[in-house]
Image (cartoon, rainbow, N blue to C red):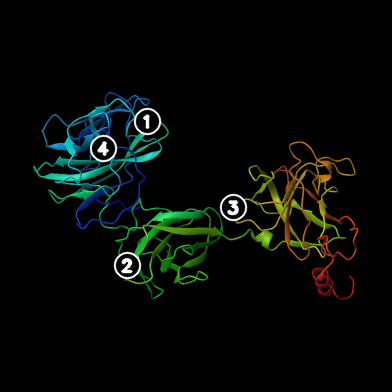
Amino acid sequence: MERLGTSFLNLIPCHLAAAVTAVVVGSSAHADIVFSDNLGWRVPQTARGLYMNFETPEASTSTSIPTGWDLHAYGPTTGRIFWEKPSSPSYRFGCVQGPRADGTIEVLSLPIGTLVGPKLVDPNWSFGTSSSTASQEGWQVEADNYIGFRFEDSEGELHYGWALMAIGETMGDRTIDEIGWESTPDTAITVGDRGAYSPCRDSNPVLIPGSNAVEMDLKAPSLETSCGSTIYKANYFQFVAPFDADYTFGTCYSKTPTKMAVLSACSDGKTLDCNNDRCEGSSSAKITVPLTADSIVYVVIGAADEATGLPEIMPVDVHLSRVRACTQAIAIEYGRDEPFNTAKGGRDAQLAQRSFDGLDFATIHQPVWFSFSPAVSGDYGFQTCDSDGDTLLAIGEQCPEVGGSFRTIAFNDDAPCPSGETRRSYIDAINNGATGPGAGFPLSRDLVAGRTYYLCVGAFDPKRPVSGSLRVIAPTASTCPADLNRDGVVNGSDLSQMLASWGPCQ
């Protein structure tokens, strides 16, 4: 990933401001912001602390580092921190601070967008000198924390900037990750301003499978795609494919007309696809591309035309294709046992819901998929009692996404079979009386005629394939034979089902 250049900087001595949520904001009106990201400078809890120089840039626990600011962090439970200026030369410096509720002066919490410059927005604010704190007030763990500062460079000119320190699970886990400052002397900067937009910047938001709410840089430049269209205010988002699958990227939940492209790289990348107006009922964008596991692409999202504004937060959905073995499942019927051999199943195990509340999951190894569409509604059952090994069995109404979990309506691992075997699988209204940790949860609903259900059968032990057959158990006979769809009423729905099934018996 590309990193923007850095210049000489002596950071102010001050403790960290309170945490705020980190977002990417628009670029400054000035083109001279010096920004460094992905620094990863951990601050040790020692008396020596961390010595930093941003010209190189570098940081070390050794005093051999050229003159810079020395940061000490003591006491992970007290949050005590010292920032000390270099003893020589004696530069002008300062950290934005103000009055606390108890009347003392302390470094302030600075939200994203706060102006730091010659004239501070709040008249109560000032630039304090070296300071420390013995409390956690204004600090937040597991968050990005920001400060505003000023410093005098080696030429005697005064500059303004901001810094980000990430705090981990404890107050003692501190890392300086980003620094931004205005290289034009005596020029204000806003906290979080990273300067001109860079598509390859490490700190740009990334996409993950599922729903994303990403921050948009509203001053990003346009992109001319090889598809012949222009994406205005084009923001780049990196995506790493976790599996071999078809991936769909979409802004369909956005009310803003958008354009989108998927590139093979952030700089001079090949355009894999681009479009707009593919979302049903909206002018938002959607693209589906096949990707191999661990491949990296860049999803570019922007406005459909120059006049269209973009929201600061854009909803972006990332969905994977369904498991192919499930979408191409073998159809089974009542009255005919369907053989299976897990040795011929997929190498990738399938995670399946095994509790009714959907909070517990089982791993089905070497999964084999079947589909079942009942001719009549009823309380069906399914079993693998004649198999030669330990099986797991699950049934659901929709194929899972690649790498996703199978949301089930019933599951069983171990159930008693008529032969006395207890390591086979049996699904019905009581799972044939199964108890214990492998009982799962029973099929507590009737299956509906004409609807397709998906069954996944596999091995309990990944090293021991299982062969056998999957049997469909007939529903209990109805006390009302004319009630073909088993809804408890004889009406037009039953007549429709009879006419739909009209023809010779198989």
Q: Earlier in the sequence, mark 2 or mark 4?
A: 4
Where residue 369 sits: x, y (%)?
Answer: 72, 57
Labels 1 & 3 near each other (Cβ < 8 A): no
Q: Is residue 464 left or right of residue 238?
A: right
Q: Which mark is residue 404?
A: none
- Label 4 belongs to which residue? 108
Q: Looking at the picture, which amino acid does disc 3 mark?
A: Gly
Q: Earlier in the sequence, mark 1 or mark 4?
A: 4
Q: Which mark is residue 222?
A: 2
Q: Looking at the picture, which amino acid does disc 4 mark?
A: Leu
Q: Residues within 10 Å of mark 2 (few under 14, many from 20)?
A: some
Q: Is residue 201 left or right of residue 454?
A: left
- Label 1 belongs to which residue? 171
Where residue 69 sits: x, y (%)?
Answer: 21, 34
Numbered disc 2: secondary structure:
loop
Numbered disc 4: secondary structure:
loop
Q: Which mark is residue 403?
A: 3
